[in-house]
Amino acid sequence: MEFLTLTEYFERLESTSKRLEMFEILAELFKSSSAEDIDKIVYMSQGQLLPPFHGLETGISEKLIERAIAEASDEPVKKVEHAYKETGDMGLAAEGLLRGRKGYGLTVLQVYEELTDIAMTGGTKSVERKIGMLANLFRGMSPKEAKYIARLVIGKLRLGIGDPTFLESLSLAQGDRELRPVLERAYNICSDLGLVAKTLLEKGMEGISKMRVTVGYPIRMALCERLPSPEDIIAKMGTAAIEAKYDGFRVQCHKDGDKIEMFSRNLEKTTRMFPEIAAAVLKYVRAKRAIIEGEALAYNEESGELLPFQVTIQRKRKHGIEELSKELPLKFFVFDLLYLDDEDYTEKPFTERRAKLEAIIDKNSIIEPSEMVLTGNPADIHRLFENTIERGLEGAIAKRPDAPYAAGARNFNWIKLKRSYKGELSDTVDVCIVGYFTGRGARTKFGIGGLLGAVYDPESETFKTLSKIGSGFSDEEFAQLKTMLDGIKLKHKHKNVDSDMSADIWVEPRYVISVTADEITRSPMHTAGRDKEGIGYALRFPRAKGFIRTDKKAEDANTVSEIIDMYEQQKKVSL
Ligand code: ATP
């Protein structure tokens, strides 16, 4: 396929916010793609070159691309800067400056390979080389192609197509929407939509159903539901495996011989951050190949005391890792086994996975199985829960003993139980920032006084507002937030945002924050969970906890239905 043809699809996708239309356009695009192109088309449509777990970044900043556009258009950099300032969109700036150019008719494959080369260019003088290569690419492009490439390389090509839309469109392209669950399972075990699409085109549905868990490809993580009390948990599960809920980083660790890779909650590569865990897994996990999951958190080596999340988070750094790992060593509490020596464990019952996990770990001071008690008695859960709270942990997680690992799903196989204080929601709510208010009074000087937070509705792939958040951040944090949000600001409300409130500045839905509140109330102001009478849900006295959740993507914000569940449950809380 020619790259110009792909940009025509991008244009059509951009101009609609109706999901049904998006399905149709994408299905048409998939039907006209070759097996060689389709994975690249999927990645580029999501504004990337490879899935995030590869950790491949273009390494191109705004300053750098301005120089490349200047070089390609034979204009001074000042003129590019001006065009960018005027339009607020690097794509439009590139399109304008390259007006009248005829492209060479580059193919998707050529463009993709060129961009990958640019991304992989490192070492001395790499900046100059990247600029030269990018300018060359622009020279071979028509203005429209340049528009999308400019947005893509600086991470701003956002067509608003989520994973579910892709999966739906892929099954539509096959003429059978019933195929969606099978495609979804394939995606959940490899986290690579491009690979799923390519397999489908090359080998059909037979190839898809033969896809297997593979070491090196992260499995989309299982998540927890909530219930308000131990009694509810036992009523739901009968017997349950109750584990301590540790408050650190979720780590999915892949061992392939003497090679280790680690992935975070949102499937980014975190291998370099936790060298002592990698070393311990190599030494103490008796397996050639394995995928294990657990929670890593900082602890005091002398007292054995586990440290709070605010301490553990300091390990999230790119530099000085070796020193930091001595200063703030980690414990790795493992709680699941998903793959072992060529055998997929995800379909096996939890108790079997857990028993095998315990069996393959040699005793050591870093890796430890999570604390677990198997019980059918709510009193045992109360006891374990109180004990975890006393030790400063977050609470407990109940797991259904006979359940498989629910890759990519949030269901009642895992149920979390957190402390609820009188007058406070038992759990924080994760909202995505969709805009901000410039603020009144003392805050005017920062230019930001409050945020507009929204929850996610996977059905419509939209963000629906739930709350204005004006407290919980320090002045410095507000100033930092303003800079971050200004980097993603938009002229109009994003097409995937559903809001009646008018933010002073709209932003792309990208950053997630955790918010605590007194309770969830019904409200006509917000669009989350709105009923026929126009009454939605809102947070009463919201305050932010911590800063941006770097472990969550916009779509990982809480969903509308979770908010409704939390609203129903707050009536019954008994802990
Ligand atoms: P999400 O469910 O979306 O991840 P969250 O980040 O707020 O939301 P919770 O739902 O509160 O997290 O808890 C689930 C997380 O708890 C897991 O992702 C994992 O990181 C952590 N966790 C701690 N201890 C355990 C355990 N024993 N078993 C499973 N998960 C655990």
Image (tube, helix red, strand yellow):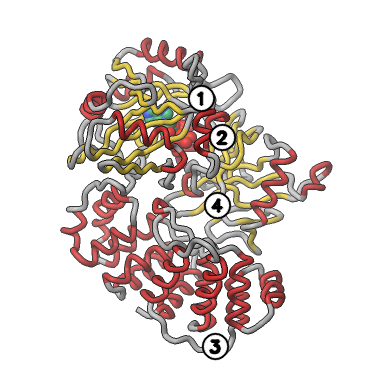
Name the amino acid type tagged 1. Lys
The Cα–Cα distance between marks 4 and 1, rounded to whole angstroms, is 32 Å
- Element at label 2: helix
For discs 4 and 1, the disc positioned in front in the rendered view: 4
Viewed as shown, does residue 132 lie left or right of 352?
right
Task: Give the residue drawn at x 53%, y 44%.
Answer: 318
Q: CA distance from mark 3 to mark 1?
A: 64 Å
Instruction: State which tag comes first along the sequence, 3 or 2.
Output: 3
Q: Are marks 2 and 4 in contact (CB under 8 Å)?
A: no
Query: Which amino acid, mark 3?
Result: Arg
**Residue ID at (48%, 86%):** 103
Q: Nearer the viewer, mark 3 or mark 2?
A: 2
Identify the disc placed on residue 314.
Answer: 2
User: Is residue 18 at all visible to an observer of this figure?
Assistant: no
Q: Is mark 3 within 8 Å of ligand 1?
A: no
In the figure, residue 400 lies in which quadrant? top left
Decide which of 68, 538 is in the foreground and name it: 68
Looking at the image, do the residues carrying marks 3 and 2 touch, with CB atoms under 8 Å apart?
A: no
Q: Is residue 265 in sight in this rendering?
A: yes
Q: Could you tell which of marks 3 and 1 lies nearer the N-terminus?
A: 3
The residue that disc 1 covers is 571
Q: Is residue 201 above or below residue 468?
A: below
Circle 1 sits in a helix, a strand or a loop, which is it?
loop
Q: Indicate which disc residue 510 carries.
A: 4
Of the numbered discs 4 and 1, the one sitting upstream in the chain is: 4
Q: Nearer the viewer, residue 99 or 172?
A: 99
For disc 3, the marked residue is 101
- Disc 1 to disc 2, how far (Cα)? 37 Å
Q: Please state which of the two labelled residues, at mark 3 or mark 1, is closer to the viewer.
A: 3
Which of the 4 image quadrants contains residue 359?
top left
The residues tagged by marks 3 and 2 sit, at their Cα atoms, a distance apart of 49 Å
